[in-house]
Structure formats: structure tokens, C-alpha cells
Image (spheres, grey):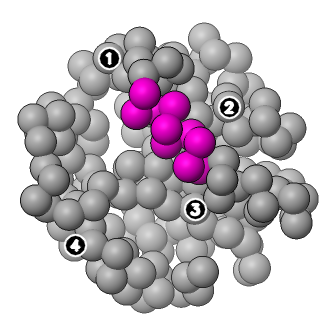
């Protein structure tokens, strides 16, 4: 779980701060071709934080999105942003039927789980994504890059590319 006090800091920064703007540009560079080639019908953002990225996805691609977070603090921000479908829940036990989504987005969330527990979250992601669906996941890289912010946000692990690919593959995802 993320430090609840960080929601206010994130909400203040995520629209204009350079890091968030840069991450959105990177993600749009990956998402634009996905959305150009496929019509996604139902999207889950698993670990939406304040809901800002869910709002941006919904507006940019005109798609229905469910924004889920463990912390009610983040969901309150999402409510103020006008996100119509908010859900409180744990990424290790998602409160949705199997095959409910054709795209699942999870940005910087799995890093909050203790090392080794990412397998349960990835298995849940695989359960709720329909066959042929897409998982878009972003995690913090390399333990050597941990910082005070990592500690303040309750980040518990970081990944190498190989480790993330192996974990996703073990959950049944084909990595592009």
C-alpha cells in the first residue's frame, strides 16, 4: 500500500510536474498505436492513485475505464475528477469477474508489494483480462535507483527488465 499522505502531494504535482508530463508522453507513445489498431471496450486502471491518469486515458481515447485503488484517499480525488466508475480493492484480489477487461493498465503499483508477492497480482491481472487482451504495466527500475521518495511512497521493490518479463510470462502473458 502506498503512503496515504502521498496522495495529496501527487494530486498537486501530476498535471504539471515534469516527471508526470514526461511519463504521460512516454505512455502515449506506446498507447497511441495500440488504440489506433484496436477498439478497447473496457479498461481497468489497477492502482489508480488519484485517478488522474484514468481521467486522461478516458478523455484522450474516449473509452470507458474503471479506476481501482486500495486507498479510499486516492479514490476521493478520482471522484472530484469526475471518474464515473471507481472501485476500492486490492490488486492481489481484484473484485471483478474473470475476463472483464480487454486492457488493464497498472502504473507504478506492483512496486508497493513485498518482493515475491507480485506473482499474485499478475495472476489476478491475467484472470480479469480477456484472452487476447492487453496488460500495460510500469514499474520502478533497479534497486540502485531507490531514493527518499521511494521510502516516502512505501515502495517495497524494484524490477529489472528480465525479472518483470519473467514474472509476466509466468502469469501467462506474452510480452511484446
Is 118 above or below relative to 145?
below
Residue 26 on the magenta segment: yes
Q: Residue at label 4?
A: 116
Q: Work out how far the residue at label 2 is from the one at label 1, CA to CA, in angstroms.
A: 18 Å
Q: Which quadrant would the C terminus be assigned to in this image?
A: bottom right
Q: How crowded is mark 2: few (under 14 residues within 10 Å), some or many (20 or more)?
A: few
Marks 2/3 in contact by CB < 8 Å: the verdict is no
Q: Residue at label 3?
A: 136
Marks 2/1 in contact by CB < 8 Å: the verdict is no
Q: Residue at x 49, y 18 (%)?
A: 16
Q: Residue at label 2?
A: 56
Sooner in the amino-acid sequence: mark 2 or mark 4: 2
Q: Is mark 4 on a helix, strand or loop?
A: loop
Q: How crowded is mark 3: few (under 14 residues within 10 Å), some or many (20 or more)?
A: few
In the rendered view, does 128 fall on the left or right side of 38? Answer: left
Is 166 above or below relative to 63?
below
Q: Is mark 1 on a helix, strand or loop?
A: helix
Sooner in the amino-acid sequence: mark 2 or mark 3: 2
For residue 9, which numbered disc appears in the image?
A: 1
Sooner in the amino-acid sequence: mark 4 or mark 3: 4
Q: Is residue 61 visible?
A: yes
Query: To which quarter of the image does residue 66 belong?
Result: top right
Q: Is the magenta stretch mostly helix, strand or loop?
A: helix
Residue 39, image x and y in percent? Answer: 90, 59
Q: Which residue is drawn at 9% across and 35% down?
A: 148
Query: To which quarter of the image does residue 159 belong?
Result: bottom left
Q: Work out how far the residue at label 2 is from the one at label 3, CA to CA, in angstroms.
A: 15 Å
Q: Which circle, 2 or 4, is nearer the viewer? A: 2
Q: Can residue 72 be seen in this view?
A: no
In the rendered view, does 57 fall on the left or right side of 140? Answer: right
Amino acid at each position: 500500500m502506498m503512503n496515504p499522505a502521498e496522495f495529496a502531494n501527487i494530486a498537486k504535482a501530476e498535471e504539471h510536474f515534469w516527471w508526470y508530463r514526461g511519463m504521460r508522453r512516454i505512455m502515449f507513445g506506446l498507447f497511441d498505436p495500440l488504440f489506433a489498431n484496436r477498439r478497447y471496450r473496457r479498461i481497468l486502471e489497477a492502482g489508480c492513485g488519484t485517478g488522474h491518469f484514468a481521467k486522461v486515458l478516458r478523455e484522450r481515447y474516449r473509452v470507458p475505464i474503471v479506476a481501482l485503488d486500495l486507498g479510499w484517499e486516492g479514490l476521493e480525488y478520482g471522484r472530484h475528477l469526475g471518474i464515473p466508475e471507481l472501485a476500492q480493492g486490492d490488486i492481489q484480489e481484484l473484485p471483478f469477474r474473470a475476463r472483464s477487461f480487454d486492457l488493464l493498465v497498472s502504473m507504478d503499483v506492483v512496486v508497493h508489494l513485498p518482493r515475491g508477492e507480485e506473482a499474485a497480482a499478475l495472476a489476478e491481472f491475467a484472470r480479469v483480462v480477456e484472452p487476447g487482451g492487453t496488460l500495460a504495466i510500469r514499474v520502478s527500475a533497479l534497486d540502485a535507483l531507490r531514493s527518499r521518495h521511494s521510502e516516502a511512497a512505501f515502495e517495497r521493490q524494484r524490477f529489472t527488465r528480465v525479472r518483470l518479463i519473467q514474472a509476466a510470462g509466468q502469469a501467462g502473458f506474452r510480452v511484446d
